[in-house]
Image (cartoon, coloured by chain):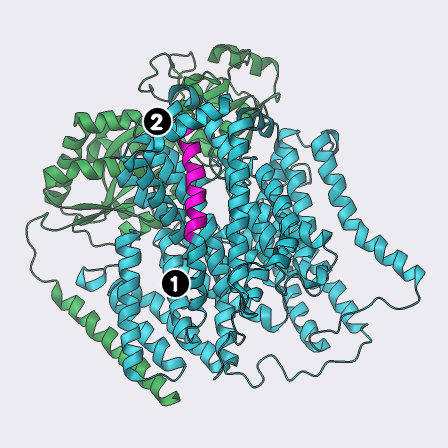
Amino acid sequence: MEKNSWTLLIIALLVGGLTALCAVSGQTQEKPFPSRQIDFVIPYDPGGSIDLMGRIFVEAIKAPLNVPVVPVNKPGAGGSIGTMFVINSKPDGYTVGACSLGSLLVSPIIEPKLPYKRSDLTVVCKTINFPIAIFVKADAPWKTLKELVDFAKQNPGKLRAAVGGPTGAPALLVESFKIQAGGLNIINIPSKGGAAQATAILGGHVEICSDPVAAEVSLLKAGRVRALASSNKVPGFPEIPTFEEAGVPGVTVTSWAGVIAPKGLPKPILDKLVSAFETASKNPTVIEQLHREAMNADFLGSEAFMKQLEKEEQMYTEITRKVGLIK
Amino acid sequence: MDVLGHLGYGFSVIITLETLFSCLVGVLLGTLIGVLPGIGAGAAISILLPISFKMAPVSSLVMLTGIFYGAMYGGSTTSILVNIPGESASVITCMDGYQMARQGRAGPALGISAFGSFIAGTFSILMIMVVAPPLAEAALKFGYPEFFGLILLGITMVSYLARGSKIKALMIAALGMMVATIGQDLVRGTERFSYGVLTLMDGIGLVPVIMGIFGIPEILENIETSLKQEVYKTKIRGLLPNRQDWKESGWPIARGTLIGFFLGLLPGVGAMIPTFISYAVEKRLSKTPEKFGTGTIAGVAGPEAANNAGVGGSLIPLLTLGIPPTAIMALLMGALMMQGVQVGPLLIKEHPEVFWGLVASMYLGNGMLLLLNLPLIGLWIRVLTVPYRVLFPLIILFTIVGSYSIAGNKYDILIMLIMGGLGYLMRKFDYEATPFVFTFILGPMFEEKFRQSLLYSSGSFLVFVQRPICAVFVAAAFLLLVSPLTGMLLRRRKTKLPEVEKAPALPRRYDLFSGTVLMALALAYMWEAGNLGIGTPRTPSPGFFPFMLGGVLVLLCLIRMVTTLGRKSPEPHFDGPWHGLRWDKTLLILASVTAYIFVLEPVGYLLTTLVLMAFLFKGIEPQKWWVALAGAVLSSAVTYILFRILLQVQLPRGIFSFG
């Protein structure tokens, strides 16, 4: 019996080795891109905003590329696990992935031990932005952002804000708002897990909350909360002002998503992918679906997006340093 | 009358072929997902997402909630049969359910959990109909300090979850909480104890931990001991609970229902925590607490009612306020928005057909589940008659796919395996798994609420005693902590007899050894916590909570070592944890699964699994060649169909671009 198990182990190793050989020798001829299925890696859980964005676009790029495209969820570590998966794939265009403000910009800034930098991958394009807003309860005394700022100035340390994860876009938005409004003293109460902001604001445990508008749409429509200002215009809610319109310019934290590929992606393949996503982002069905999820189509090609990223990188480094997330 | 009218309307909405069918599919799928360890919400969402693009809103919501409560019915099955919780809310069911199965009473255990779930489910639907909106508003009043008080009270109940030594239960509970501190700090975002390892950065997932710590050691231990005989020696006795079982389960079901429902109302509590509380309460109230953990039916009935009532309770904030009870439900709501349905305060007004249709479908679904589950019992207990040498490779395979399915991350399998190794050592040195898991779950919430409360109160500790609800919880926790101590003192004074000490399970040197190892671990952990910065109690830094936690464990270890050294009872005869056992098989299993993890992605699921299964079928226990090969082919093919095709789990395709 003992012998049997060893022979088996040896057989297993042999089979493994042989198949690995086949794998290496099998990949010789290259057909013009794209000739087979493309995997679209989504580094977040199914059902989240990046996932929904990804799935909407996956449906829409099948037609221009004329091959199957399959969403593959690889969630974990704030998007880093899926991003690493893309980085470690072959730069042949058959593995691309979604990226977000967090995975592409913020995590590399605040996490020194992160195993990747932005330069380890090819930035394909930006696809959308999704508005994040500052909410108060419907019966709160502040009708406009200005009134809130005035109150906060006269009552430092009295206001509390539910902001979600400490390094997420909603938390950074509040930090940026506090800086741009002249150094407000508002206490951030972070939390883990979903829907904590809505619970905290409805229960009256905080005065303010910062949350993607998508998470608060039903409360907004029911008149239970009021949005004082938002990072971007909100589809379906033209009355919600941006920060600039509300009188606090300079709050430029906005949450977005885009597409990445492994480093060294050949230019012709990159161009094909970019144009497929551009076509998709002009597709009326796509725009309609994005609006339902309170997102805006916001296309930027590879180079334009890279320029924006460089600008934003400076801003986020500044904000995170000011609030002590990095030294 | 009004409610009945609405309900009638609801039934009129769902009596369509599509909705009935979605309800059936939902509960079936839920049961399946519940039964399969690990496969959970992730699978539910990936199936639902593409479908929900096309289905009517009522139907997709009906299906969705069907999955949700169907999983609660199914989750207990695996707990009872093979000691692996099919669903995290069924962890506690392992304690007595599995023991019942080993005594041949799997039937009554499965039966009482189905009936208990049905009763609890029905109760919570009634409550949803009658008092949903005011209850939801009341639950919102639960702020940061109240949550802290509740969790503090929960944690003090940890010693009720142990069968043996209370101190050892507390020690292992502290270790569980330590493992849970891995990952991002809540306030500063600092990474703690993850050392740049991506899989650790989010913290360790619950599913690999519970599968590893419950399931793997059970398999290894059975393999080591059962060379010839089967694990389930006793004859199967009874398919359904008898009169005596009902008598013992009635009150636990009632109490479990109430506990589950009211705790479930609180956003973020979910269905799992109530099961622990229910178990602790039943043990505390029982006249025979020593029977808990040895297969007492009350220990199954209460928690199983609690998890179903918990699901019902958590639907109330969802339906009336749009506050999803779990992160998973939040994701599913996002999917529903795609169809233009916003679950929230306006749901009843804008979409009465969705709301009342859903309520009606829940009656229907619960009925379906009961009808479905009772005949299934006969089938399930037949699983136990399968020879263990055939059963165990399959169990291992299901835990592997279960771990992988969560995030498509092979390192989750590795974590499951490491936790399995830890759980195995814990058994060898007589530490119990349940306290570990309990604090692993509650620990992060405990720290989160503590720090949120202090931010909320600007650093004032008075917040914990000034707010009435919180003060009651804190006082109750204090009393629970103090009562055994005073009880012990009083008893000492009354009788001269020494405290009735249970015969120690292990000789002194084993406890001293494990105590030393744990203490060394705790000290290293404190050192690392110190490096993260400790801060002050009012303004804690990322290292504050871990530092305190490590200190508690050091203290517990010292207490245990002192009492062990001072023990006067005669040393039990013991040849060592590995004496006369085939521990080489344990090593073979662990090594082969480790190898599997690293070959899985390059080579692909089908081929790798085939080889692993052939090895497990043939290499561990004697087996005919053709049986092993047939088993390997069948199990790889069936799991492939089940997971990849039916449940849409993304399995690695590997070199053949297939699979």
Q: Position of residue A123 (x, y in %)?
A: 24, 40
Q: Say which of B145 and B96 sits in front.
A: B96
Quick check: B435 left or right of A142?
right
Q: Residue furthest front?
A: B243
Figure chain in green? A
> Within 10 angstroms of label 2, few (less than 14), some, or many (20 or more) residues?
many
* Residue range highlighted in magenta: B356-372
- Amino acid type, callout 1: Phe
Can the viewer see residue A213?
Answer: yes
Chain identity of mark 2: B
Marks 1 and 2: in contact by CB < 8 Å? no
Most frequent secondary structure within the magenta stretch:
helix
Figure chain in cyan? B
Q: Say which of B71 and A223 sits in front.
A: B71
Q: Position of residue A146 (x, y in %)?
A: 48, 11
Dot 1 corresponds to which residue? Answer: B398
Question: Any mark on residue B341, and which?
Answer: 2
Question: Any mark on residue A297, and which?
Answer: none
Instruction: Give the spatial CA distance, label 2 vs label 1.
Output: 36 Å
Secondary-structure class at tag 2: loop
Q: Position of residue A74 (x, y in %)?
A: 33, 49
